[in-house]
Image (tube, rainbow, N blue to C red):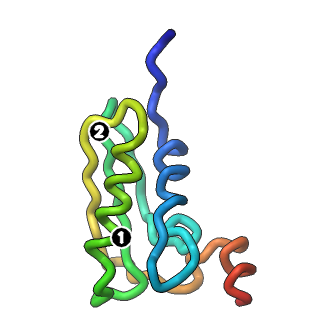
Amino acid sequence: MADAVLTREDVLTALKGVYDPEIPINVVDLGLVYDVRVTDGDVYVQMTLTFPGCGMGPQIAQQAEWAIQDLEGVEEVNIEMVFDPPWTPDLISPDARSQLGI
């Protein structure tokens, strides 16, 4: 059996299991994930928080890293938190908007 090839979609699927503890929506549908790159077994994720001073930032980043590390074929994970461009509610997916009633 050939080794599975890790894809960007695999990483995004894993990240859909990571939630901001203060909002019942996953980080992908909240629009917090700006970039995902997979090179061989190395995964780079650029993400943000709903606001720069969010105290849950380290916890969310750790959960994201753990979720990605659980994927087959992952060697290294690099989570980069950025605040430019700043997150806005416009980044929330249509499904999440519906869940939140907005």
Label 1: state its secondary structure. Answer: helix
Residue pictured at 45% horizontal, 76% vertical: 20
Question: Residue 94, how many percent across, how many down?
Answer: 71, 73
Residue underneath mark 1: 60
Residue 14 located left or right of residue 86: right
* Mark-to-mark CA distance, 1 and 2: 20 Å
At mark 2, the secondary structure is strand
- The part of the image, by quadrant, that contains residue 43 is top left
Q: How many marks?
A: 2
Indicate the position of residue 62 as horizontal and vertical percent values.
29, 63
Work out whether 74 lies above or below 13: above
> Mark 1 is on which residue type?
Ile
Q: Residue at x 32, y 55 (%)?
A: 65
Q: Name the residue rendered at 48%, 70% in the picture.
A: 19
List x then y, in percent, for residue 98: 74, 80
Q: How many neighbours does mark 1 have within 10 angstroms: few (below 14), some (14-19), or many (20 or more)?
A: some
* Left or right, 88 with reference to 40: right
Query: Looking at the rendering, which quadrant does residue 39 occupy?
Result: top left
Which residue in the rendered view is the most extreme toward the top?
A: 1
Which residue is depicted at the point 52% across and 71% down? 31
Q: Is residue 85 above or below residue 40?
A: below
> Left or right of 38: which side holds 81?
left
Nearer to us of marks 1 and 2 is: 1
Circle 2: residue type: Asp
Residue annotated with mark 2: 42
Residue 46's place in the image compared with 82, above or below, is: above
Which of the marked residues, 1 or 2, is nearer the chain's N terminus? 2
